[in-house]
Amino acid sequence: MPDSPLQHVDEEFRRILKLLNGPAHTPVHQLTPAAARAQAEYLFQGPSVQAVGRQDDLVAQTNAGDIPCRLYHPQPGERLPLLVYYHGGGWVLGNLDSAHGLTASLAARSGCAVLSVDYRLAPENPFPAAVEDAMAALEWATDSAESLSIDKTRIAVGGDSAGGNLAAVVSILARDAGGPAVQYQLLIYPATDAACNTRSMDRFAEGLVLEKKDMFWFWSHYCDDRSVRENDVRASPLRVADAGGLPPAYCLLAELDPLIDEGQAYADRLEAAGVAVTCRRVPGAIHAFLGFWQVSSLADRELTLAAKAVAAALG
């Protein structure tokens, strides 16, 4: 009989899993979206962050509507490279505050400006609303480079989980539209394939933060037409017909994550098309591990490496 994946979880994360698997936590797929948001807010409330030079809450006025954003600028007055960042949460959960610890830390550790995007959430705003907001925010940031004190020739996109999905999708859309010119993509355990039929999806189906049933719950709220979500590249970027010409990528994957196989498949797809890819498979790590950087030396190390990769890519 094969051993349990739990035996291979990093020791620091075993303690976290005991809390997340305890009676105070209900699996997402058993909740309504409102209840899931309340639970997530309680679990991940108010992390302290590294100091960053300046932080401003802004509204991107776009053709997709007004999109709340938060700009982190480590060196006010200096024109810096920019990382446009999309938070995780299965397109249903998350906001600027839930992403605050990661986005502020990425800015502080990379020395780049970071624009965190509060895209519309499902099921109130189903697919492709999040994609439209993600793309519109990127275009707005490029057009507003002067007022934001950023260098529009050095822009990256990034995100974790559902946000990694949006970063990959936006990179494809920007390439196909002839701009904005994205120089790099930071894909942190991204969702890339709505089919959810990989070996890792079954191997790590329960007990490791993100469960297989959770993924079907997220996908059904985001895009309830299975044929659409499995075939439209705006939902499943792994379905892109041609991966050539996409920006270089840093793919950060967790060894014990249901999404690792589809993340690896996307990294392989990019590499096969001639795209420069750095792919890190982190032993002992679980989905969403980077958000625990304050209590995990493993996550803290990987956050620094990811930030340095963005800084190096944007010069």
Image (tube, helix red, strand yellow):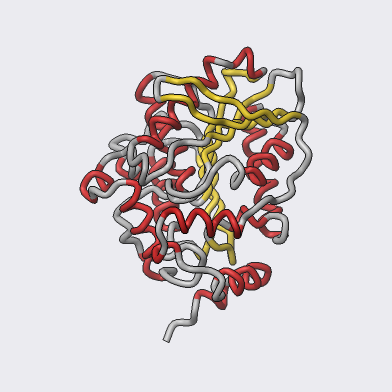
Q: Quadrant of the C terminus?
A: top right
**Residue 146's spot in the image, x, y percent?**
62, 12
Q: Is residue 176 positioned above or below 265 on the image?
A: above
Number of labels in the image equals: 0
Q: Is residue 99 positioned above or below 177 on the image?
A: below
Report whether 201 appears left or right of 311.
Answer: left
Where, by quadrant of the figure, is residue 214 drawn?
Answer: bottom left
Q: Does the rendering let one see residue 308?
A: no
| Residue at (56, 16) in percent of width and height | 144
Report whether 282 appears left or right of 48.
Answer: left
User: Is residue 127 or residue 83 the one in the foreground?
Assistant: 127
**Residue 45's spot in the image, x, y percent?**
64, 53
Q: Is residue 189 positioned above or below 206 on the image?
A: above
Q: Report the residue that reaches farthest toward the bottom.
A: 1
| Residue at (76, 43) in percent of width and height | 50
| Residue at (23, 48) in percent of width and height | 225
Report whether 190 appears left or right of 84.
Answer: left
| Residue at (42, 87) in percent of width and height | 1
**Residue 289's spot in the image, x, y percent?**
59, 58
Q: Does the rendering let one see residue 132?
A: yes
Q: Is residue 24 positioned above or below 191 on the image?
A: below
**Residue 282's spot in the image, x, y percent?**
58, 59
Q: Report the residue that reaches farthest toward the left.
A: 227
Where, by quadrant of the figure, is residue 82 drawn?
Answer: top right
